């Protein structure tokens, strides 16, 4: 029922930056069924390139990636599009990094692994606040 | 041994040197003293002899042969002399040049005695004034003679006087020093001229040595230390008198002469020996103490090493767990999401008609549920292991307790133990290492569970704030700790668990950690009633209103738990 309502509005444009390929793939498939259009980026560099190429309503950023520190990526994101809300994903036990991220302008954070429903709720909150 | 030698050597050297110097100077002093004494007496005797000679000279010069030849006059003169000097003069006599005693006054019947062959007469004919050696003479008694030769009408005559040996002897006999010191006089032939205090053989090498040496015949005083016939050490002092005819000898046992020195030496040696004994004892005691201290330090170090190894083991196990948890998290998340994707797809029309739809849904739900369970397990593992480091940070004690209790929940279930927590809300944050605090609590809980494993029970964990301190109580209703073990439970390697089950390090590590935090850990136990561990941690640096003061911390060790009357309290309190 929810999905049908979602379909009525314009899809949310989400940039998902996470280096866990399997996770990104299944999440983007499931989100697309919930009126969220996911652009995948498997590392910080890809994420930044994608952000330069098009506009997004919201970004979900994993803080622990191989090529770049998530906080650094966040800073660059905030430089390119200061208004775009960024939700951070952190591993359990590294909440401190997430709290640091909020200082640098992140919207909020979730600890991984999280429920899809929680993530979607957070995304909607962020989009609502951003729009 | 070296310590003893090094400390004794200077002691003995210095005392030896001082003793030697003291001995030498004391000896010199004694010799000087004896020398002076002898010289004085020698002078006395010399002047005695001269005086007697002078008296006789005076007689002969004053009265002449004619007067003195009269025996009654001579008797008067003798009486006059005896009046003046006592019984020193025994008799007087006039001897003509042929050795015939022409006149005599005295107690013996010596009138007309012939002295022609007598040594003294021969000597007197050669010298004008003469004093003889002591001899027995005609009368058979020791005496000596003072003679003055004069001339009357071209003929030689001699006035002679006999000097009483007893009176003369008294002069020498009176010389007494100490117990064994006495004097006597020898003539050049080594014959005694006085009766010595002790019987001695006059013809001794040592005296002869003096006599030969005394060629100078001056006033020189010889002091020699030697041995007598019995091998006894003696001091001999000698000097010449009567123009070198006689020699005054003084002898004394060395031990007597140096009796003061001997006493001093004895006292010194006793002090020295006592001192040496003291040094040896001190050295032994000190070295033993040192060895003990080192041994204790070694044991302590060993214990610390064990603790470090134990802590390190826990840390590495924690790291490993954290790594595994992280690695597992992602695949589990993907699995759960893939299951979710299948659920999404099952909502499509085409699958709705499938007769196995319910079974699919159930299976997927099960995958999600089990995925969640995996997630919980990894989360717990992570939260326990993520900070196995001693970094001090702000810690909420209640959170740590909740975490550890959750972690122990499964074990508690198997042990049929109910864990109750009574946590004071809104406690200030504690500055501590979270992982260390976890370790302490986990150890206490595990011990309690072990203790109650047989019959089950209740484990109460409570926190509260008391003054400037956090109090954590971990209280079980297990069998309690026997009194005999109470004193030792915090000792490393003390364990009552079966071999291979307990290391005996748990409580020791707890103690170490709490001590490091500046807190105390105490235990109260009553048999068949249960055991309570009380941890007191100072809330210093925390956002508390009053900082902890050391005195307060110190007193807290005596708090009795009102709930366990008569409970024995062992304090692991550290100040």
Image: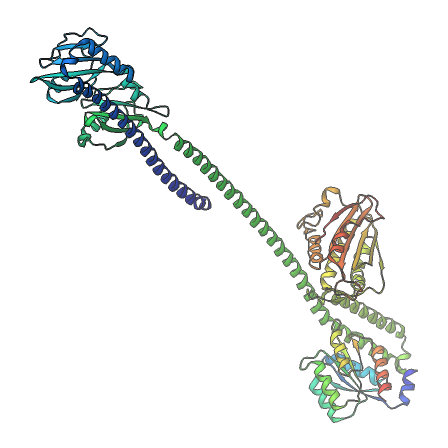
Of B13 and B285, the residue lying toward us: B13
Could you say which quadrant of the image residue B220 lies in? top left
B458 vs B229, nearest the viewer: B229
Q: Where is residue B224 in the image (x, y as percent from the top left)?
A: 27, 31
Quick one: which residue is furthest to the top in this view? Answer: B109
Judging depth in this view, the residue of B554 and B347 nearest the camera is B554
Vertical order, B271 against B377 (above or below): above
- The answer to whether residue B521 is seen in the rendering is yes
Q: In which quarter of the image is the C terminus of chain B?
A: bottom right
Give the image location of residue B58, x and y in percent.
20, 21
B363 with respect to B301 (left or right): right
**Residue sitting at x 53%, y 45%:** B286
What's the image's color scheme?
rainbow
- Position of residue B260 in the picture relative to residue A3 (left or right): left
Residue B399 pos. (x, y %): 80, 64
- Residue drawn at x 93%, y 82% is A1
Question: Which image quadrant: the N terminus of chain B?
Answer: top left
Query: Can you see residue B203?
Result: no
Quadrant location of residue A38? bottom right
């Amino acid at each position: 029922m929810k999905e049908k309502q979602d379909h009525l509005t314009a899809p949310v444009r989400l940039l998902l930056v996470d280096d866990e390929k399997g996770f990104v793939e299944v999440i983007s498939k499931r989100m697309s069924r919930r009126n969220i259009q996911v652009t995948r980026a498997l590392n910080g560099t890809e994420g930044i390139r994608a952000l330069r190429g098009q506009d997004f309503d919201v970004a979900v950023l994993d803080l622990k990636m191989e090529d770049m520190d998530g906080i650094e990526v966040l800073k660059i994101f905030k430089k390119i599009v200061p208004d775009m809300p960024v939700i951070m994903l952190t591993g359990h036990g590294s909440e401190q990094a997430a709290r640091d991220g909020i200082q640098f302008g992140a919207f909020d954070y979730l600890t991984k692994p999280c429920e899809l429903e929680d993530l979607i709720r957070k995304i909607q909150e962020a989009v609502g606040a951003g729009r | 041994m070296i310590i003893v030698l090094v400390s004794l050597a200077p002691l003995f050297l210095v005392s030896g040197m001082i003793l030697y110097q003291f001995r030498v100077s004391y000896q010199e002093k004694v010799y000087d003293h004896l020398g002076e004494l002898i010289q004085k007496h020698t002078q006395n005797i010399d002047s005695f002899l001269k005086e007697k000679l002078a008296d006789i000279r005076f007689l002969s010069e004053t009265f002449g042969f004619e007067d003195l030849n009269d025996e009654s006059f001579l008797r008067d003169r003798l009486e006059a002399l005896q009046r003046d000097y006592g019984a020193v003069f025994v008799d007087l006599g006039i001897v003509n040049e042929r050795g015939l005693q022409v006149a005599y006054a005295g107690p013996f019947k010596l009138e007309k005695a012939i002295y022609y062959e007598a040594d003294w007469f021969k000597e007197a004919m050669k010298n004008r004034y003469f004093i003889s050696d002591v001899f027995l003479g005609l009368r058979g008694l020791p005496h000596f003679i003072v003679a003055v030769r004069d001339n009357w009408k071209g003929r030689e005559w001699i006035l002679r006087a006999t000097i009483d040996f007893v009176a003369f002897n008294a002069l020498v006999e009176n010389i007494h020093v100490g117990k064994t010191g006495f004097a006597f006089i020898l003539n050049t032939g080594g014959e005694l001229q006085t009766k010595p205090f002790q019987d001695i053989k006059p013809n001794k090498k040592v005296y002869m040595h003096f006599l030969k040496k005394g060629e100078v015949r001056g006033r020189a005083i010889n002091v020699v230390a030697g041995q007598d016939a019995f091998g006894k050490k003696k001091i001999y002092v000698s000097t010449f008198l009567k123009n070198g005819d006689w020699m005054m000898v003084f002898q004394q046992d060395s031990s007597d002469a140096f009796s003061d020195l001997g006493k001093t030496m004895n006292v010194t040696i006793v002090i020295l020996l006592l001192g040496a004994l003291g040094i040896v004892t001190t050295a032994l005691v000190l070295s033993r103490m040192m060895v003990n201290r080192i041994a204790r330090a070694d044991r302590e170090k060993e214990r610390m090493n064990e603790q470090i190894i134990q802590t390190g083991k826990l840390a590495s196990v924690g790291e490993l767990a954290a790594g595994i948890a992280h690695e597992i998290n992602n695949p589990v998340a993907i699995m759960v999401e893939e299951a979710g994707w299948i659920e999404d797809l099952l909502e499509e029309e085409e699958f709705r008609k499938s007769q196995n739809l319910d079974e699919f849904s159930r299976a997927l739900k099960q995958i999600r549920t089990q995925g969640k369970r995996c997630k919980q397990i990894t989360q717990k593992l992570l939260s326990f292991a993520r900070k196995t480091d001693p970094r001090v940070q702000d810690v909420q004690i209640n959170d740590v307790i909740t975490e550890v209790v959750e972690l122990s929940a499964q074990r508690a279930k198997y042990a049929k133990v109910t864990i109750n927590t009574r946590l004071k809300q809104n406690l200030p944050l504690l500055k501590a290492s979270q992982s260390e605090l976890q370790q302490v609590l986990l150890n206490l809980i595990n011990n309690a569970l072990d203790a109650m494993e047989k019959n089950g029970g209740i484990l109460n964990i409570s926190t509260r704030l008391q003054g400037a301190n956090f109090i954590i109580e971990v209280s079980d209703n297990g069998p309690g700790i026997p009194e005999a073990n109470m004193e030792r439970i915090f000792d490393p390697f003390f364990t009552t668990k079966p071999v291979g089950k307990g290391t005996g390090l748990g409580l020791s590590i707890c103690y170490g950690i709490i001590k490091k935090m500046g807190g105390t850990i105490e235990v109260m136990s009553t048999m068949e009633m249960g055991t309570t561990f009380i941890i007191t941690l100072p809330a210093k640096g925390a956002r508390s209103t009053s900082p902890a003061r050391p005195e307060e911390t110190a007193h807290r060790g005596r708090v009795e738990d009102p709930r366990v009357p008569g409970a024995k309290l062992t304090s692991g309190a550290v100040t």
